[in-house]
Image: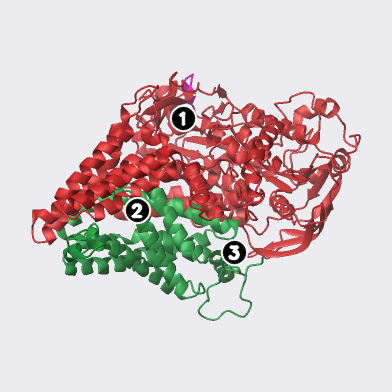
Chain colours: A green, B red
Amino acid sequence: MAPQVTSEPRAAAPRSITATRPLLGWRTVDILTIAFLGAALGVAFWGWGVFYTGPLTALKIGYAPLMGLFAGPWFLAGVVGGLVVRRPGAALFCEVVAALVSMLPGTEWGATVLVSGILQGLGAELAFAVFGYRAFGAAVAVLAGVLSAPLEWAFEVVSFPASWADVPVLSVLADGGGWYAEWVLRDKLVYLGAMTLSGAVLAGLLGWVLVRALARAGALSAFPAGQEQREIRAV
Amino acid sequence: MQVSALTWRPFGRREPVLRSVTLRLGPGERVLLVGPSGSGKSTLLRALAGLLETADAGDLEGEVLVDGAPPGARPGMVGLVLQEPGAGVVAASVGRDVAFGPENVGMPPVAMPAVVASALTAVGLGDLPLDTPTSALSGGQTQRLALAGTLALDPSVVLLDEPTAMLDPRSAEEVRDAVAALTGVVRRSHRVEGWSGALTEGSEGAAGHPSGQRPPVLAGAATPTLVVVEHVLAPWVDLVDRLVVLSADGRVVADGPVRETLEIERHRLLDMGIWVPDEGPPRPLAVDPALIAPRRRPRDAVGRSGPAAALTATPLTVERSTRLVDGTVRTRPAARLTSPLDAAPGTLTALVGPSGSGKSTVLHALAGFLDPTTADAVRVRTPGSDTSPGSGTSPGSGTSPGARTAPGDLAATDLARAMAWVPQWSSSTIVAATVLEEVLATSAALGDVDPATSERARSLLTTLRLGHLARADPRHLSGGEQRRLAVAAALLHGPPVLLADEPTVGQDRRTWAAVVGLVAAYRSAGGAVVAATHDRHVVERATVVHRLEPPPRAVEPALPAAVPLVARCGPLALLVGALLAIPAGVISPHWTTSLAVLATQAVLALVGLSAPGPGTRSRGRLRATGLRMLPGVVAALSVGWSTWFLAGRDLDPALTVALRVLVIVLPSAVLIPWIDPDRLGDHLAQRVRLPDRPVVATAAALQRVHSFGEVWGELARVRRIRGLGVSWRSPSSVAAHLGALTMGLLVRTLHAAAELAVAMDARGFATARARSWWMPAPWPWRDTLLVALATLPALVAVVAG
């Protein structure tokens, strides 16, 4: 399977090199790289979680929805996984492995980390899917970071109305909800805005920069991202 | 095996690495493949295994056929053992690791034990219990395990990529014995020393069948064809019957019976820098001592306190503690230095001993990275400020010049002035973007880069045959090149002490002569060297030799700790049990309900953590669970606070959300620690029917999570000893530090993934469509009970709500 390298002269804006066809034909190195990247980022997640639970808790004493500004790093695995392997499922797989790894040593969120991983990964995956797994520039990376936020946000702030108490099946849910169910809507929306902004910068842009740096370090030679670097530098 | 006109150019390279290579290997033939470094030997092996494009991309021409089919036609047809021990380890236990190939071809589980046992016996590991952790094996055992893994698939061809380059002589001999047994060569004597001198007697008597007179291998015989890549030839000459020589530009330049070819090509091989039998070590290169003179001249030292050593250590022991999952801590000695060590100017102190004897650990202790049990064991003299012209300030050190200090107490810049370190993983020393900047990095951190220093840096690179690479990215260099670069980068700023971990590994004769010559010049200029080494010719040059013995293993308690009830359940049940807390928390409408739910959970937790039955009592369990709850408690408090603050300063909703957090988190703290990654993989694939290959890959990655911590630690140490310290008062230094460590960790991780991909594909993983499993994934009644009990809190929530 020779990787596809565009042979026509490169335009001013370099186009993304896509993964080898078929897109769903995951090579061993694709699977392992996602798993290893996810594991390494999972360890980083855990470290970030300690920081987040520790010093950053001061923010909660002030205005808690601003915590969303620090949510971005948790979306990083999805963005990086998608940018490196460029196959359907890469972003989701990477984010889930990272969540699993950060869950095992114990965090303040317990097993919900796994659920969050799936929700965030699905969001990032959506961004790459929208472009048919053909575009992997900075803008797409930022979009992936942005889309990682909404599902996770919904999971954290969901609240079920007390009026459901009379509805047959839904009654068990009445008055229940997620971590921040009791906030007023305005605060919840501020939280969404903060998370989205953080996702765009700390996951999207940072992820894109990170993948480029890894490619330059020669660590991605088996992947399209690595080949793009070689194409740019080819002499 | 037929190789026809094979040419390979990886993308990003102008010149092909292999040029029109044509070879024909008969069944059972044993071939030694040699060539100068960078001649594409490893690449050719990967081509022979059909794995060139597994972890790289490029233009490939020509073809490889094994028994008339491409190498991947039958999984495991071509087995491959990689250079670095452990690079190809897939699983946590020996049995599961060997069974990886059979699993990939869908062998019925009942047939596996016999195959695994015979493969392990063939490599001399038949006595190991199948559940031995792969992490507990020595380097030599790990390489033999890799060989067993290929044998389990009954290969036609076995490829060995410098299988002993990273091993001590005894382990290397074990591996060669296993290879000899495999190929039917009878060896009479063990020659642990190996290398040049020993071959004179070896060539006469060691091989049972002198080359050319071996009994012909019968058609269809089980003896596989063997191809070995090595650059130290002597120990392998008896084991092979043919020698193939690759040139620096990737062509086959000689091919024939091993002894004749050695005779004819002797000078060409020596020119390539290959360690040819019957040839003593090369003469060390003459290097001008002025190039790397340590800042503190010996006469300064002698004047004050006689033959003062720049670094001293009393006998010391380093202990390593492991915290087990049940909260108990097990401490065992990791290394022991039994006699005092004085690194005096001009001396070379050699630390020798088998792998696992703690040589690297002692070096770590000398550099102050670890705390030896005797707190004041290691003392280093800090170079006086008068001898370091132009140096910047050293914040936070507070040490007076010339004082004797524990290295761990020094600020990064002072430590860099006092000593340098070449770690075992020389790629981790890289802190700069070009080779030249890399050499200058420590001098720059100490604030003394001037044109003369840059000039010395260039000369140093030229001496080490790296001059042409001055502007290259150091991360793209080969392993041997990176090691030489690490030596240059350690010495340029003139530290009085050099700690070097295997400084000559992977060097050919020419670069070996350069490294040894450079170290000699450094000594004659007054430097003190402490080196951990297996290299006989380096040990010969030592002033003092410290022989380290592997410390005794920790004594296992006679009675194992009693197993708590939750630990007797399967991983899937544990995970489901933890996840069931989420609905329980979400549907709790009011804190009064949550309180009832929490109480139920607490009772269940106490029952689950109790450990009836035989075994020693462990007191750490509840405390460990409490510790794991701590972040959850912090989260509950902060979420409760924010809700109180933002939702009308009402205590009611605040209590509700706070208790909801505790309800969700408590079961995770109790259940998740007992999940075993390998067994979770078994269950996710066999019970939940998740796709096999991602599950196996994830389990393999989880296996290695602990190694990430080690890599991170080593990268941090390197930065510290190279003078790149972190100060919490300077956020930019913290950011630079974290960024560098993260990048370093990710780069190392990606390389590990690529290596493992090659090893896994060589064992049939690429085509594993219908895998079978070494271990079944049973679901005993206990698991059902656990899930039923874990539903209880949710039921309480519904009823009470």
Residue A204 is covered by the magenta coloring: no
Q: Position of residue A54 (x, y in %)?
A: 25, 48
Q: Is residue B652 left or right of residue B225?
A: left
**Which contiguous range is marked in magenta?**
B337-344
Q: Position of residue A135 (x, y in %)?
A: 49, 74
10 Å crowding of disc 1: few (<14), some (14-19), many (20+) = few
Q: Is residue B770 visible?
A: yes
Q: CA distance from mark 2 to mark 1?
A: 63 Å
Q: Is residue B530 left or right of residue B116?
A: left
Query: Which residue has dot 2 on it?
Result: A113
- On screen, A62 above or below B183? below
For residue A25, the mark is 3
The answer to which image quadrant residue B57 occupies is: bottom right
Query: Which amino acid type corresponds to the residue marked 3 in the rendered image?
Result: Gly
Q: Nearer the viewer, mark 2 or mark 1?
A: 2
Q: Position of residue B801 (x, y in %)?
A: 18, 53
Q: Tell me which label, 2 or 3, sits earlier in the chain.
A: 3
Query: Which amino acid type corresponds to the residue marked 2 in the rendered image?
Result: Val
Q: For numbered disc 1, what is the local secondary structure?
A: helix
Q: CA distance from mark 2 to mark 3?
A: 29 Å
| Residues at marks 2 and 1 on the same chain | no
